Image (tube, rainbow, N blue to C red):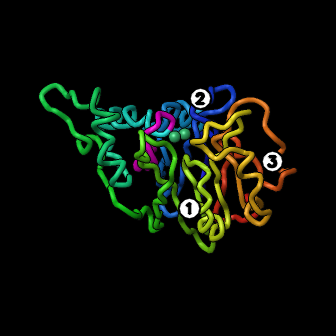
């Protein structure tokens, strides 16, 4: 399986520096592509790699911030009005599925002339409260604590999956909640870690100053993404694998590309 970061930046990344942290998985079986998060930059980031909406037959949405869901309207509308396309499968945790239409998409997507559209007008909805299967790979949705609305955490789910002998943990957006993260850190062979590199902590992402204190054995498995524009600490010197670069490809069948 090929894993490509179409962008590796924070929500407020801009094109010249980076795009939003969304990634593309390509199945070795049939080259089918699963887009993991579809932020507002996704159509440009995909085009940079030579892809269009026609290449995206499945999408996973981790949570409802614009850098993760802001491109879903584009994907839904372009595939809906192109008769050569089928509805993309939408993999999503049921807690996110419960609110995505009314809070995020309905304003513009409901209006379809004669018809009042629903989420399923555009997407083949595959919601679950735990996991989903895509091309024989089981993806476990891992609950993260990212942002609160007053005292209620808003639903946000990273992904954990195994491919061959490797276990991969993609944190998604998360604050530094070590009790929740540690079992996945320990199990994983490769960790893609949400990393904030601002000079101050927003507290809704893992800040570099928090993850740099992790044990060496964990840091050496970590690739950092969702980082901010500007000066970055020397993460290799601090024991991490590196910063994921926009367009960086991880071939999960070839261990030397990421170890
Ligand atoms: Zn984000
Ligand atoms: Zn977020």
Give the residue at mark 2: 12
Query: Which numbered disc, 2 or 1, marks the residue that appears first in the sequence?
Result: 2
> Percent x, y for residue 253?
65, 65
Q: Which residues are magenta?
A: 54-67
Residue at figure coordinates x 42%, y 39% from the top left: 150
Name the disc covering residue 180, or none: 1
Residue at figure coordinates x 49%, y 60% from the top left: 142
Residue at figure coordinates x 67%, y 62% from the top left: 190
- Tell whether 219 sits left or right of 105: right
- Tell whether 186 sits left or right of 103: right
Quarter of the figure with the N terminus: bottom right
In which quarter of the view is residue 77 placed? top left
- Tell whether 237 sits left or right of 178: right
Does 110 appear above or below 242? Answer: above
Mark 3 → mark 1, Cα distance in angstroms: 23 Å
Q: Secondary structure at mark 1?
A: helix
Is residue 163 visible to the viewer in this orientation of the structure?
A: yes
Name the disc covering residue 235, or none: 3
Q: For mark 3, does the 10 Å Cα neighbourhood hold few (<14), some (14 to 19), or many (20 or more) residues?
A: some
């Amino acid at each position: 399986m090929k894993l490509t970061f179409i962008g590796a930046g924070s929500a407020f990344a801009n094109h010249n520096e980076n795009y939003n942290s969304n990634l593309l998985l390509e199945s070795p079986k049939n080259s089918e592509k699963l887009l993991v998060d579809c932020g507002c930059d996704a159509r440009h980031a995909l085009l940079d790699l030579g892809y269009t909406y026609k290449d995206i037959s499945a999408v996973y949405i981790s949570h409802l911030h614009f850098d993760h869901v802001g491109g879903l309207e584009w994907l839904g509308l372009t595939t809906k009005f192109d008769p050569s396309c089928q509805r993309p499968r939408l993999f999503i945790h049921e807690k996110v599925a419960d609110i995505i239409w009314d809070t995020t998409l309905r304003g513009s997507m409901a209006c379809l002339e004669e018809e009042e559209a629903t989420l399923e007008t555009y997407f083949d909805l595959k919601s679950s409260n735990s996991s989903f299967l895509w091309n024989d790979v089981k993806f476990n949705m891992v609950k993260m604590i990212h942002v609160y609305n007053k005292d209620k955490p808003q639903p946000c789910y990273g992904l954990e999956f195994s491919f061959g002998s490797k276990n991969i943990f993609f944190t998604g957006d998360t604050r530094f909640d070590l009790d929740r993260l540690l079992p996945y850190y320990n199990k994983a062979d490769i960790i893609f870690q949400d990393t904030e590199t601002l000079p101050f902590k927003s507290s809704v992402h893992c800040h570099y100053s928090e993850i740099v204190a992790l044990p060496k054995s964990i840091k050496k498995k970590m690739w950092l993404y969702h980082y901010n524009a500007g000066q970055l600490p020397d993460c290799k010197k601090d024991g991490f694998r590196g910063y994921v670069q926009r367009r960086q490809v991880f071939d999960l069948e070839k261990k030397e590309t990421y170890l």
